[in-house]
Image: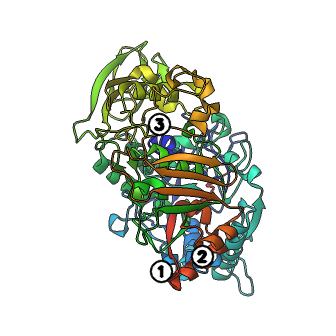
Amino acid sequence: MGIFSKRPTAIVALMAVLVPILAACGGAPAAPEVIRETVVVVQTAEPIRETVVVAPTAEGGTPGTTGAAFTTPHPILGDPKVRQAIAYCTNRPELIQSVYSYLTPEQQEGLLMDTNLPKTHWAAASDADGIVTYPFDPEKGKALLEEAGWKLEEGETVRANADGVPLTLEFTTTNAQFRITWATVLEKQLLDNCGIQIIRKHAPASWWFGSASGLRRRDFELGAYAWVGEADPGGRTLYACDQIPLPDNNWNGQNYMGWCNQSASNAITAANNTLNRDERIENYKAFQVEFTKDMISLPLFQRLEAYGWNKALQNMKPDPTEYITANAYEWARSDNEDTIILGFTQEPDTMFTLVSSAAVQRQAAQLVEGVLTTQYNYDFQPVLQDGLSTIESGKAKNEVIEVKEGDTVWDATGAAVELKPGVELINSDGETVTYQSGTVKMNQLTVTYDLIEGITWSDGEPLKKADLELGVKIVCDPKSGNVSLTFCESHQGAEGMNVTSDTSYTITFLPGVQWPTYYLAPYGGYPSHLELSDGRKLADVPAEEWATLPEVAETPLGYGPYILKEWNKGQSLVYEANPNFVLGEPKVKNVVIQIFADTNAAVAALLTGEVDILEKATLGAGPEVETVLKAAEEGKIEARTDASPTWEHMDMNLFVR
């Protein structure tokens, strides 16, 4: 059934939040509160420039006083010369080689990042924009360390300062073998290249990403983990000055480095408070210049993802930010066969997209639901949505209105609240202000979303108003199992959406809501006419029952390119082409998802022709990828590797507890 047009992280993207990947394991902290700041000036590597590093204090505290946690600059990492030296002394291509040795040099080079955004991202900055890059250059690193007062005495292997304190830092990451491998190489690099000693601490993910330990308590000096990038860059909670986790703000925020560069903070805040893409790009580029100059977080490399498929398949579109099934309606075969078999090593938990977040579920459901929009190559494209609903297209408007006490608004933390004295909000000029009395000007966004004409359910019934109304009703009902109602709350639930026709609806958002991806249709429909086996109509079933309905969780009716005909639990899901698909009946008449016990079994099936596609979630990036790539070199199959949106990085904590 067509509800959300985007993957499970789409709501996260709408909220402009990045989360640590589950492979590393941990979710995003709650929305951070505003904190007090005290300014401490720290000299940068360039004498003519100055970086302001802010040490947030406890109530009434001052930097360096007893009881004011994280207000004393780190004696080593507080110096930007040391941080920059660490970057120059790190041979990132060698780290990539240690975990992806089977890649060609060109493929390995493609995994390098210079900023917090992949090089192919629409908002990525380049050398021409003034970013600082850190190619492996140990001589430059050693020179910076000398300038910073860290000397390597004859016969010694570790540098020390004038007081004899060794240049030793604790390095914390998970105990996953992947990170043990490259961290072992990093330890040797820093010591051999520049006399920097790191003491590796490989902690369980449950501690490193725990709710009251590790990262969230900023209990590290150097810390490595991964972020998952999105088509919308977001990033404010990671890097803004008011997003530093501290005891006094209940550890809210994800700026674990404790970094406050006011220019960078202003730029990333501005990038997330305008709907004009050109303005966003300029602000993101300004942010990346400061991010690279201060070197508070070193991007190490993007993870690898890989695909393999039968040479007879046509129109495959593997992509780092979209699922392989997104264009299944375009698939074809050159050998006149009428079936394509995908190999999965995990079985979907349900076909009810609203309550699941697994990649395998999304792909299984896309075949039935179809997609309103896709997000290829870090950007968005309309499919069943009739054009993106941008301000430029005339389908959206962002008006300045006046709000007063008692009105419901979207506050600065991203919550629907009643306006009263003390509420912090973002005004129409993009400034964070505290409301006292009277009126204040805020932006109010109104968007009309159109779906293409002719969308028809696979049983032949056309999409209608009642289906769209049922869609938003269920999505915005907490009893349905939807765990993220933030988007619904931003337009006050179903009441904030006006369905104007069988294929169009308008949402008026609360004053202050400025979703960066406002132009993507957030809701599709549910088949209100569907009669259940017990005689009830789907539209009459309470939301709390939906997750257990076979007609929703196992054999849903959809308007996508395929119909799910059989689900043999633990074995396979069998689909056939939907003759009523609005973009035309698919050329491939049958699709089967085959469940395998492990990746080795799935790869063996691909090489023998029993399986036609292994996508990135199934194939992963382990040793099996090398087998697939070798088979492709021998002409047996097609294969491709991509730089994943998931990227490893090393944060540097600028303050001590």
Badge 2 element: helix
Sequence-wise first label, 2 or 3: 3
Instruction: Name the mark on residue 607.
Output: 2
* Front disc: 2 or 3: 2
Residue on which disc 3 sits? 3
Circle nearer the N terminus (1, 3): 3
The 10 Å Cα crowd at callout 1, few under 14, some 14 to 19, many 20 or more, is few
Asked whether 336 or 342 is in front, the reply is 336
**Disc 1 target residue:** 106
Nearest-to-viewer mark from 1 and 3: 3
Q: Is residue 154 left or right of residue 451?
A: right
Residue 493 vs 36, above or below: the answer is above
Q: Earlier in the sequence, mark 2 or mark 1?
A: 1
Residue 342 sits above or below residue 459 on the image? below
Q: CA distance from mark 2 to mark 1?
A: 25 Å
Which amino acid is tagged 2?
Leu
Q: Residue at x 68, y 40 (%)?
A: 68
Across and down, in percent, residue 64 comes to 67, 46
Along the horizontal axis of the image, is 572 left or right of 463? right
What residue type is disc 1 on?
Answer: Glu
Judge the density around disc 2: few (<14), some (14-19), many (≥20) Cα neighbours within 10 Å. some
Left or right of 166 in this view: 479: left
Where is residue 8 shown, x and y percent of the image? 53, 44
- State whether residue 491 is above or below residue 306: above
Circle 1 SS class: helix
Report whether residue 353 is seen.
yes
Q: Give whichever of 234, 127 is nearer the camera.
A: 234
Residue 411 visible at all: no
Image spot of residue 565 (x, y percent)? 55, 46
Give me the residue at 68% from left, 80% from top: 152
